[in-house]
Image: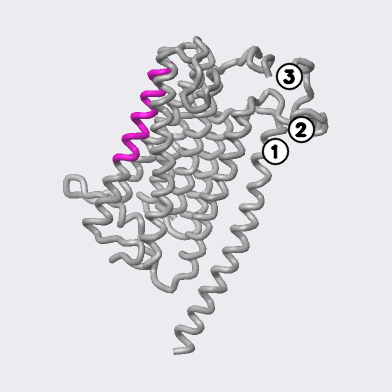
Amino acid sequence: MTSDKKQEVHTHKIGVYLWIWGLLFVFSFFSYMVDYINYQGLLRWSLIIFFMLVKAGLIMAIFMHLYWERWAIVNVLLWPMTAIGVFIAIMAAESYYTFFSRMFYFVVGS
Amino acid sequence: MSQFDISKLPKGSKGFMYDWGSDQRAFKGVPWGKAMMWIFLLSDTFIFSCFLISLMTARASTVVPWPYASEVFGLTVFGTSVPLLLIAIMTFVLITSSGTMAIAVKYGYEKNRKLCGWFLVATALGGLTFVGMQAFEWSKLIFHDGVRPWGNPFGAEQFGAFFFMVTGFHGTHVSIGVIFLFIFARKVFRGDFETGRRGYFTSMKSDYEAIEILGLYWHFVDLVWVFIFAFFYLW
């Protein structure tokens, strides 16, 4: 362990962080504008998700230094996200089924 | 661990195979504390995902219209109502504190004690501002609008439960982060990492790595807010 501490840690120029900071501001402003201009429907959802993923990517890659980490840890951190994706898909299907049965029994059954 | 020079190891996917097949520690060049923080954050990701996924499930399956967050969280400024104004300001405050944290980590690694400490303090103040605005938002919703976990005047009853649960859990994370930011700002100003003073709880010596590990937690809090902002407030 001792040699780890002695390893030269190279830092990045402050400009990198200021740039990302600025970009995060801009993208947050854009996603706020989606609400302000009051886009609805598919356009709204895709814009929200796009800006969200860009911001999340910038934070993880630069602020959390994942871009400079070795793939050994990057893969360990990112692959579990597929499980979340699968869970989202399962629960989306489940919720549509619940909605359907509620509509069916509340309306038709009453 | 002196048998390898990290800059000479294979990189990319080859490096991934090499590190995991090396029959040694897999996370080369990653201090244990940092690896453990990442694994904690991974588990925390799953907790927040469960909250947001159940929000999706409740919202997609309710037969009652979901409250329109844009209006619920709108503020009236000089007679004009601006949608989501407070939330937008909170978002910018949290991003700013994330930026100052990244800079604190940078100065920490450069052993610039003073600047590292002051940027930690700035980060903590940003976090405090965020929590303060959240307290304002909560009290407005509870006392002015009468939102309860079991009902609210705007629409679907689950709205209140999800609002308090999701933003409350996130706000708790921010508050804990603020406490640790102040603790570590004190450590940095006192020069604990130079003198090798042992920590109060851990009784172990620490290094400026600790600032990066704290930074990971703080950026994660910001990261989670990105998703809450998107799914709870904007959707």
Q: Which residues are magenta?
A: B116-132
Q: Amino acid at mark 3?
A: Ile
Q: Which residue is mark 2?
A: B16
**Magenta span dominant secondary structure:** helix
- Indicate yes or no whether the magenta region holds residue B119: yes
Q: Report the quarter where the N terminus of chain B lies.
A: top right
Q: Amino acid at mark 1?
A: Asn
Query: Given the image, what chain letter belongs to the residue carrying mark 1?
Result: A
Could you confirm whether marks 2 and 1 are on the same chain?
A: no
Is residue B228 found left or right of A88 in the rendered image? Answer: left
Front-most of residues B47 and A1 = A1
Q: Amino acid at mark 2?
A: Phe
The CA distance from mark 2 to mark 3 is: 13 Å
The crowding category of the residue bearing disc 1, from other C-alpha atoms within 10 Å (few below 14, some 14 to 19, many at least 20), is few
Q: Which residue is mark 1?
A: A75
Is residue B9 found left or right of B125 in the rendered image? Answer: right
Mark 2 or mark 3, earlier in chain: 3
Under circle 3, the secondary element is helix
Residue B176: percent from left, percent from top: 42, 37
Query: Given the image, what chain letter belongs to the residue carrying mark 2?
Result: B
Q: Which residue is mark 3?
A: B6
Under circle 2, the secondary element is helix
Tell me: residue B67, above or below residue B36: below
Q: How did the renderer colour the structure?
A: one colour
